[in-house]
Structures are given as structure tokens and as C-alpha cells.
Amino acid sequence: MSTKTVLVTGTSSGIGLATAVAAARSGWHVVATMRDTGKAGALLAAAEEAGVTVDVRPLDVTDPASVEACLGGLDRLDALVNNAGAGHVGTLEQEGVDDVRAVMEVNFFGVLHVTKAALPLLRASGGRVVTVTSVGGVIGQPFNEAYCAAKFAVEGFMESLAPVAATVGVSVSVVEPGAVASEFVENVGLADNALELAGPYAPALSAYLERTRGAFANAQASQEVAAELVELLAAERPAFRVLTSEAARAFAGVKLKDLDGSAVQAMTGGWVA
């Protein structure tokens, strides 16, 4: 395991940081990437505390040149963890299509850029692609239209890619957390006066935010998700889908057995009533 290399995107905080440290503790050579390496302080401190080292490199998943420079600098790659992403709260009538495109660039096309660049190296090593999606890639959620659309797209893309990649020796998996205690929620771009600006959607948004605060009060720790990811990296026969908590399994299970869509609509409709 000490000779194997994993590249993890979005490691400045949250799941990415915890995964980079946990993988290093498990014997992986970790290439820990982030858009701004000036924000590597928390990662480096956590690695030092754990008694491990990580190889920090710049990578902006939305910039093909940055992706090529980072992946082109690797001689070997045994696993890729697509973790970089950004939350977004909003609804269609009140935001521009360019706002939606920006969400797709980070959460969907960023995953594609990095995976495409990694596949030749992963074919050579018989490696694996692990992509952190979300239960929001299984169930569409109010005021998360753009974010869930991006995560649905990632789920569909990876589910379709998996059997093709398997023919050349590369396994593909998705990991679906529910609510996770990290800086992710702080980065959804919601203005302080969002309710004032919400107009006719203000009552629904207020109800949604109250429900969400409650959900994240009981959120799973990033380290728990990281442990699931590291276990998946080491699995002899990795599963395609991994839900990281009982809450995530229960939530996604509503959709997976909801053939006419009524159960999901009844559930999420209650969030904004």
C-alpha cells in the first residue's frame, strides 16, 4: 500500500481534508489538491498531528489547464477521489441561468475534467475512481435545484461509466453522504438578507432553512465519511454506491423504492410548507 498513490480534490477543509489525512494514515501516498494552496494550513496541521505527510498541489477542477498540469505531473496514480464541490441555495425564477452553469462547472464538469485526465493513469495501474456525490444526487431537494441537478448528472455519468471503465480494469464508485458537519454549508452563497430578497418564495425558504438547520445540527462528522472512503479505496471488490450513514440510507431509500414519485414529493413538500 505504501507505493500506491491517491489524488484527492478539495482538501482544504471538510471531507477532503479528513480523507487526505485518513488515507495517508492507511499508507497511501496522498496527492492533496486544492484551488488555493495558500489555504493548506489546516490540512498540514492535521497531517502533522496525525504523524503523516501529504503532497499538496494546486488544482482548480474548473480549469482544464490546471487539471492537465496537475495530473501530467504524476508518474503513477492508483486512485482518484473526486471530492471538490460547492453548495448552492436558490430557485430558478430568482437567479440567472449563468448561476446554474457555475454550479454545474464546479460540481459536474469539474469531476469530468479530473476523471478524464486521470483515466490513462488508472488504466495503467488497474485503479479506481471514487466520487463524492450526495443524497442530493438521488433525491431533488427544495432550493437546491442547481446543486441537485449537478449531483444527479454526476450520478448518472458515473453509473454509465462504471461498466465501460471495468472493461479496462478501472472500478468506479460513488459515495453519498447526507448532512455532514463541515464548512460546506457556509459556502452555499446565501446572502444575509436572503429572506428579504426571496419575495413570494420567502415563506417556503424560511421553512426550508429552519428544517435544514435542524438536519445539520445532527450532521455526520467529516472523519466518518473519510473512513468510509478509505475503506472503499482498499476494498478488493468496491461497491458502486456507498451511503455513509443510516440517515443517508433511510433518506435515499425513499427514492429507490418510490416508483411513482409520490413518496419523495410528500416528503420534500413538507420541508417548505
Image: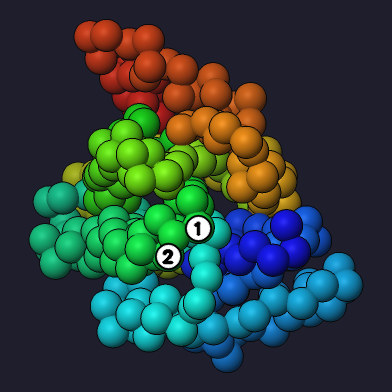
Residue 199 located left or right of residue 1? left
- Dividing the picture into quadrants, the one containing residue 140 is top left
> In the rendered structure, which amino acid carries the disc numbered 1?
Ser
Quarter of the picture containing the C terminus is top left
Residue drawn at x 58%, y 63% is 6
> Residue 141, percent across and down?
34, 36
- Dividing the picture into quadrants, the one containing residue 143 is top left
Per the image, label 2 sits on a secondary structure element best described as helix
Residue 121 is tagged as: 2
Q: Do the CB atoms of the residues marked 2 and 1 lie less than 8 Å apart?
A: yes
Residue drawn at x 30%, y 73% is 62
> Residue 19, percent across and down?
66, 58
Residue with the mark numbered 1 = 125
Residue 174 located left or right of residue 144? right
> Residue 108, percent across and down?
29, 56
Q: Judge whether 200 appears above or below 47 on screen.
A: above
